[in-house]
Image (tube, grey):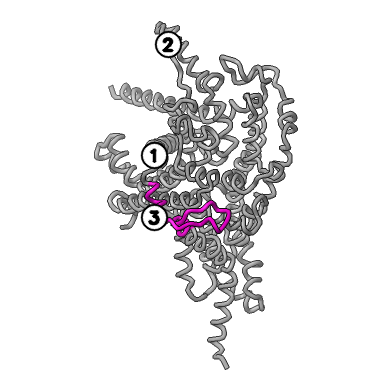
Amino acid sequence: MLHPNRKRHTRENVTGYLFASPWLIGFFALTLGPMVLSLLFSLIQWDGISVKTIRWAGFDNYSRAAGDPDVHTALVNTAYYSFVSVPLSLAVALGLAMLLNQRIRGLAIFRTIFYMPSVIGGVATIMMWLWVFNPDYGLLNGALRNGCNLLAALGIDSARTWELPKWLMSDRWAMPSLILMNLWGAGASMLIFLAALQNVPDSLYEAADLDGAGRWRKFLHITVPQISPAIFFNLVMGIIGSFQVFTQSFLMTGGGPNKATLFYVLYLYNKAFQDFEIGYASALAWILFVIIMFFTLLVLRSSKLWVYYEGE
Amino acid sequence: MKTRSARQYRVRRLAFKAFLYLLAIGLSTSFLFPVVWAFGASLKPLSEVYRFPPTFFSWPPRWANYPEALSKLPFAQFIANTFVITVGSMVGQVLSASLVGYAFARLRWRWREFWFVCLLATMMLPGQVLLIPHYLLFKNLGWVNTYKPLIVPSWLGGGAFFIFLFRQFFKGIPSELEDAARIDGAGDFQIYWRIFLPLAKPILVTVAIMSFIGHWKEFMGPLIYLSDYERYPIALGLRMYQQVEGGSFVHYLMAASVVGLFPLLVLFFFAQRYITKALLLTGSKA
């Protein structure tokens, strides 16, 4: 006969596993199992249809990726987007947060307006931006043309004939267009910054005032260190998100023009679901995993040097 | 002398305030422009849409664009489909994340801490790694071109972050309530269902809203799994307007986009408090 205490333990154990079972099933069937499969896939060649067509490839998929000019293009594009768009949108978010932190009236309205795009953004807003960017009939070039005409009226005659960017249709401007559109979604980071700014104790600024510190010095020596955990968080999330860009380029440019917006995940999608190269696409996915891990760990490691935590 | 410098100081302060207001108004207007611009385009006849220089609005507004846009393609069907996918996933995520969160917070079972580390580790894994195995798995189950690949995973835990939110909340509830119920003879499931779940209402609402928004906007999943356009959600349906040759559907595309955005706008304005809370919870986790 079991000891009553032991019996209770067994019962608790069973209940615990029962309650956690949805996740446990999901963990094995949808995370761990697929991870192992994906690793195996990356070592074979397969069209995903018939088991008979499976061929062992070893590390061929990985070496093929290393020499694939399209992978090279996609990596350069993704890095370009990531390294410009993430710092830029952090700066914009911080600027907006500092503006809202100035005790201005109507704060709630401004905050709502800045925050809204980051929540509602999706296919519908991408379609709207598509028409904003239209080089001939879009809002952006309409406004720029008005600006040029104003300059012309002010005496700069050549402004009337200046050529305006073709935005998504030009290989030079397509990427800046997507970066600009991404800035529109800076509101989420802004809110995290705003919450951090509101937690900076006033006494620190008052002490700095007594020392005669100017705005810029106060910003650099008080604000930035105090909100560094928020900067760190937004940076990590921004990097992870920017390496996974897909929908914008798929819908707005299809990776073009001339592969100017061929993002890494778009290329992966094309390989997997258009060319049905299961093995190669799986290898590409693992390479992406390593890249994201690398940058996340880099920021994580460096955070000890520049992130300030209260009470340490 | 003294009064003059005081006045100078006040004037400078006032000028600074005025500058801040101008900046805030200018920036917030430009944040609204894309949506206002698209709304304007959705009320124009095609000839006005293709006019240079472009205008925000043309008079009279062509409201007929809306019924026309919605009848050119089965848009009502797209909306209904979106609701099925979104609500089906949302219910699953709320229920399973709260159940699993409860297990991690209040129940004692072997290896619990080990599994918790596994749970947190899954947050680090980019979804692209699982994309292909998931597709092959669901294809072999015969689930392609059904909503199952989009809904069923939500019922299996509902994602590490939501589980984590519930766990944090349940951990903070004093055990007196639980003990009292146990003396009254309540079982574990009853305690979870009758006591803890009602207490977790703020988290419940937050998770439900985040889940709703996330699934409403989802694009890649439906793109991969759905092939019949009768089953498309709005996100895929909009693409069909975009693909009409020659750009003769632009005004309809804008009208359909406005309609697709509308539920999110309403939700945003009524539930901003909860959405903001969820965001800041994410932030404070770091």
Instruction: Determine which of the numbered discs, if any, sits on residue B177 in the image.
Output: none
Disc 1 sits on a residue from what chain? A
Q: Residue B76 or A55: which is nearer the viewer?
A: A55
Q: For label 1, count other residues whose C-alpha is less than 10 Å away and answer few (under 14), some (14-19) or many (20+).
A: few
Q: Are there few (<14), some (14-19), or many (20+) residues within 10 Å of tag 2?
A: some
The residue sitting at the left extreme is: A211
| Amino acid type of the residue that numbered disc 1 sits on in the rendered structure | Pro
Q: Tag 2 or tag 1, which sits nearer the N-term?
A: 1
Is residue A94 at all visible to an observer of this figure?
no
- Give percent across and percent down for residue B208: 61, 52
- Looking at the picture, which amino acid does disc 2 mark? Ala
Point out the stretch of residues depicted in magenta.
A38-65
Q: Do dots 1 and 2 share one subunit?
A: yes
Identify which residue is drawn at 53% across, 49% down. Answer: B277
Question: Which quadrant of the view contains residue B159?
Answer: bottom right
Question: Which residue corresponds to mark 1?
Answer: A69
Q: Earlier in the sequence, mark 2 or mark 3?
A: 3
Res A59 label:
3
CA–CA distance between discs 2 and 3? 56 Å
For the N terminus of chain A, the quadrant is bottom right
In this rendering, the label closer to the viewer, 1 or 2: 1
> Residue A125: image x %, image y %?
57, 34
Residue A169 appears in the figure: yes
Q: What secondary structure is found at the residue carrying circle 2? A: helix
Is A61 colored magenta in this rendering? yes
Q: Are marks 3 and 1 on the same chain?
A: yes
